[in-house]
Image (cartoon, rainbow, N blue to C red):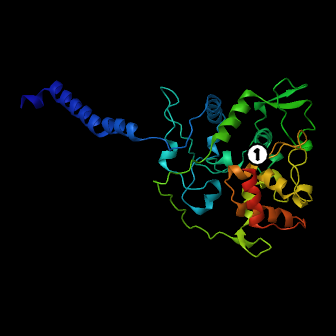
Amino acid sequence: MDFFNDHKKLFSSALAFFLFLTLIICIFPALNNQKVYQPLQGSKALTEEESRGKAIYIREGCVACHTQQVRNVDMDQVFGNRPSLAVDYARNKRLNLFQNTATLMGTERTGPDLTNIGIRQSSKDWQYSHLFNPRSVVPQSIMPSYQWLFLIKEQLDPGDKEISLPDAFKRKIKGKIVPSKDASDLVAYLLSLKQTELPKSIPTREFLYKKEEKKTNGTAGGDNLPDGEALFAANCATCHQATGEGVPGAFPPLKGDKVVLGDNLELYVTIIMKGYNGLAPQFGEMPPVGTNANFKPEDVAALINHERTGWGNNGKKVTVEEVKTIMDKIK
């Protein structure tokens, strides 16, 4: 009974027992998890530039409005190809000794989820314009402007890139708008956000309440194709706008465009799959949208048919076979 009367022995034993349980229940399992918990094959660690961009993303409070977690419901499918898994965040490390891992999953969806923004919107020009003034590319946006991340210069220095901005948003600005190092790093981080394809050994979870994919009679032969309008809205509308009129001074219109309505189908397909910079400096560079989004010939044909028949355009529809022949040629 002396043990219970000796407070030193009693509390020392309780402390030792507590530490023993902590080791067995918490620390040893966590160390074991660190050994077996590996990033997805094909995922890439952030570069030095992208890591600085992540720190700026945190500093500017972007996580307050944007998530990086695709929920397991169909309403968010536009933000990613699959629901997010814990392994998607395996590369996250502690920020420093005093700050824990920054997953940046977020809780508010005031703005769109950014899990797959590097694929959904891979245009640097669009990203810079959006940061400088979101209304310049998304008229209904409620996102604040981050103009302090940019420099106004009278003349461009070697290596500088002037951002593409509609004339209406440059009237009060005397000089050329150039991204600062912070803006460049932030955009590099945003463009690095891409969902990694799951290996075959991991089954893909289905979205709940999944809607049936729309089909449209999109070829001259009457074959069913994916919904070209939906493909355009998900991959092209942010630059070329839902009206097909583009953004004057930043992104060209597709309504009445000579490439869209022309006979050079190979050029048309090449632009979709590999991007285009033939309209610089008046317009920004177009990224390889089709390659980034893993477009199949059916997707490209549906997209072309939508653009050739939408907004008053009266172009000739294409078949999957025509598109597939060109895609095989330009690989």
Q: Does residue 287 appear left or right of residue 162 in this picture?
A: left
Amino acid carrying label 1: it is Pro
Q: Residues within 10 Å of mark 1 (few under 14, many from 20)?
A: many
Q: Please, what secondary structure does the residue beneath circle 1 have? A: loop
Which residue is painted at 69% across and 32% down in the image?
185
Name the residue furthest bottom: 222
Residue 252 placed where, x, y %? 88, 50
Q: Does residue 214 appear left or right of residue 197 in this picture?
A: right
Q: Quadrant of residue 178?
A: top right
Q: Quadrant of residue 32?
A: top left
Q: Nearer the viewer, residue 19 or 179?
A: 179
Which residue is painted at 59% across and 62% down in the image?
74
Residue 169 placed where, x, y %? 88, 41
Which residue is painted at 61% across and 69% down in the image?
211
Residue 48 placed where, x, y %? 62, 28
Q: Quadrant of the N terminus?
A: top left
Residue 277 placed where, x, y %? 84, 42
Q: Nearer the viewer, residue 157 or 182?
A: 157
- Residue wearing tag 1: 287
Which residue is painted at 53% across and 37% down in the image?
102
